[in-house]
Image (spheres, rainbow, N blue to C red):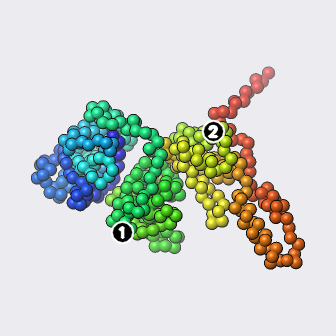
């Protein structure tokens, strides 16, 4: 079982999201807890008012709503009664057993799962702390429930599955607004809350694995000037296609303001996460027979790390981004240190001036010679060698990881 917890400031949006699924036949409300009436006797307004009345007891709490999904292995087929028993046990163990909550069974995914919606304001107006709720209470609860209800354990799944990011199948996505919105919401739900990114470029490096782009538009566009953002689906060539969806159209509101807050909170990274990535890169270059960045990319992909190279319109590499699917971190190369920037990595892999650039130079020289027949022609190989020496990245020999460097002994003063 896999549990995902999301918090928000609008219980109404979360409630409407699930109820709209019910109205379209894609979900069913299978139970409620701590409501005054049975679920069959309540209207939508009665369900929602139970939450809003409790929220009014504490106006100071901004993030007052909680949206939880409990996901099961595709081979599991649990009855409604068992799903409710799992939900009730889970909510009790994370400290929400006495809170009002609704449980919905969804049918619009390739695996069985339920959604639970609740609020974190208690009957006396006190706020339930949501800080690190997943680590402190959800993870222990999940493991206990797997044992109690004999569920397939999340740890028993093939770890390689987490590395296979499946892009949206463009043939199955209708470019009308409803289907595009559904496809984008599925990707954003998975990426925005799971990965640690500190800039829009780092976020897009992950989103583009799913053929999705977060787009602010040009600097003179209405979207950019109004500090807005839209999400678009990319085709196989990476070109935006279909109808762009505004961030405000999604129920979880992935607006620019939301992303900027994530950039700030995601900026501090664990040193162990950085060290893991740098060590994998260093050991690959040291021990593997790697002669170019393509070979390095293939090796890192086996280790769960995707490399995204940023190139200019002329085809020159000017940046690199690493996506570590193991630790869910996205790092710009320069943020790891100079040795891991695009220029340094190309140099460390032994890349020379690109062959296609040599062909380009030869063609330009031939054109120059034909247009200037009276001018003395030059040996193209000499010019290419000169350009190689000027444009090739600086080689550095000091790229041995700290863990493998010998410590210098301090001489004792006599």
Q: Is residue 189 visible?
A: yes
Q: Tag count in the figure?
A: 2
Which label belongs to residue 176? 1
Q: How crowded is mark 2: few (under 14 residues within 10 Å), some or many (20 or more)?
A: few
What element does badge 2 sit on?
A: helix
Residue 241 or 260: which is nearer the viewer?
A: 241
In this rendering, position of residue 396 left or right of residue 41: right
Q: Considering only vertical position in the picture, is 253 above or below 334?
A: below
Residue 277: % across, % down? 57, 42
Q: Which residue is drawn at 19% across and 48% down?
A: 30
Q: Which residue is at 12% across, 48% downward?
A: 38
> Is residue 330 depicted above or below 286 in this figure?
below
Q: Where is residue 300 in the image (x, y as percent from the top left)?
A: 57, 45
x 27%, y 32%: residue = 148
Residue 96 visible in rendering: no
Relative placement, left or right, of 399 versus 156 is right
Towards the viewer: 248 or 373: 373
- Residue 52, position as x, y percentages in the image: 22, 54
Distance of label 2 from label 1 (alpha carbons): 47 Å
Counting residues from the start of the chain, the first of labels 2 and 1 encountered is: 1
In the drawing, does residue 395 fall left or right of residue 175?
right
Tell me, for residue 283, which label it has, or none: 2
- Quadrant that contains the N terminus: top left
């Amino acid at each position: 079982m896999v549990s995902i917890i999301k918090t928000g400031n609008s219980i109404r949006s979360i409630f409407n999201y699930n109820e709209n699924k019910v109205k379209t036949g894609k979900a069913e409300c299978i139970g409620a807890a701590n409501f005054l009436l049975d679920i069959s006797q309540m209207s939508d307004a009665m369900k929602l008012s139970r939450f809003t009345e409790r929220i009014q007891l504490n106006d100071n709490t901004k993030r007052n709503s909680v949206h939880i999904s409990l996901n099961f292995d595709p081979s599991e087929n649990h009855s409604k009664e068992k799903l409710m028993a799992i939900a009730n046990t889970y909510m009790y163990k994370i400290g929400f057993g006495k809170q009002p909550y609704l449980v919905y069974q969804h049918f619009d995914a390739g695996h069985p799962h339920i959604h639970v919606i609740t609020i974190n304001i208690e009957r006396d107006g006190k706020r339930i702390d949501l800080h690190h709720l997943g680590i402190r209470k959800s993870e222990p609860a999940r493991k206990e429930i797997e044992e109690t209800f004999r569920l397939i354990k999340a740890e028993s799944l093939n770890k390689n599955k987490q590395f296979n990011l499946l892009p949206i199948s463009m043939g199955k996505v209708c470019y009308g607004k409803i289907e595009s919105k559904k496809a984008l919401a599925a990707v954003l739900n998975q990426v925005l809350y799971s990965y640690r990114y500190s800039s829009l470029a780092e976020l897009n490096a992950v989103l583009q694995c799913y053929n999705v782009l977060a787009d602010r538009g040009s600097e003179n566009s209405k979207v950019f000037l109004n500090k807005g953002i839209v999400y678009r689906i990319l085709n196989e060539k990476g070109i935006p296609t279909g109808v762009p969806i505004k961030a405000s159209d999604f129920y979880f509101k992935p607006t620019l303001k939301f992303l900027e807050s994530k950039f700030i909170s995601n900026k501090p990274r664990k040193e162990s996460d950085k060290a893991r990535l740098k060590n994998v890169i260093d050991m690959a270059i040291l021990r593997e027979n790697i002669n170019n960045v393509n070979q390095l990319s293939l090796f890192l992909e086996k280790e769960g790390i995707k490399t995204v190279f940023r190139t200019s319109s002329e085809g020159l590499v000017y940046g690199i981004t690493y996506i570590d699917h193991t630790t869910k971190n996205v790092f710009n190369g320069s943020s790891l240190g100079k040795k891991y920037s695009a220029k340094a990595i190309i140099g460390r892999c032994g890349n020379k001036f690109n062959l296609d650039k040599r062909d380009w130079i030869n063609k330009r020289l031939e054109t120059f010679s034909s247009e200037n027949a009276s001018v003395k022609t030059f040996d193209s190989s000499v010019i290419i060698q000169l350009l190689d020496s000027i444009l090739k990245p600086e080689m550095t020999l000091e790229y041995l990881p700290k863990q493998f460097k010998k410590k210098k002994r301090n001489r004792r003063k006599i």
